[in-house]
Image: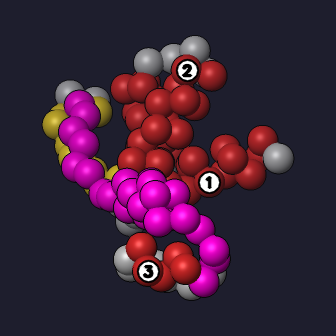
Amino acid sequence: MPAFGSIRDFNVLNIEPESASQLLESLSQARMIRKHSATLHGHRTSFSLEDAFWDELNAIATQKNMPLAALLREIDDGRSPDSNLSSALRVFVLDWVRQAR
């Protein structure tokens, strides 16, 4: 899929400027990385995640009927000591989505 950096780039897809603007905004938000903080086992930690992954983690916690903090602890406890929490969270979401197929 080609990279889109401006509304003009959507002309190749025959998308109206207003729709292209909305789509570009949605894509930008999905790629936005935000810092989050959590307390895991009594220690404050922070991690960076794209909004789409954060939203999916919240949805998974809801589906599992557990607080988000408990899900984060579960993922943290299961990750390899040489991996970082942000990556572990992304892989968890990817695995969850794949299993749902």
For disc 3, the neighbor class at 10 Å (few under 14, some 14 to 19, many from 20) is: few
Type of residue at label 1? Answer: Leu
CA separation in Å, label 1 and label 2: 17 Å
Q: Of marks 3 and 1, which one's residue comes earlier in the chain?
A: 3
Task: Check disc 1 and report the residue beneath it.
Answer: 94
Q: Quadrant of the N terminus?
A: bottom right
Q: Which residue is mark 2?
A: 62
**Residue sitting at x 61%, y 21%:** 64
Q: Nearer the viewer, residue 79 or 52?
A: 52
**For the residue carrying disc 1, how many other residues have a C-alpha within 10 Å: few (<14), some (14-19), or many (20+)?**
some
| Rendered position, 59 above or below 87 | above
For residue 8, the mark is 3
Comparing 60 with 19, the one in front is 19
**Residue at screen point 56% across, 49% down:** 92
Per the rendered image, the range of residues in magenta is: 12-39
First-in-chain label (1 vs 2): 2
What residue appears at the point 62 percent right and 54 percent down from the top-left corner? 94
Q: Amino acid at mark 2?
A: Thr
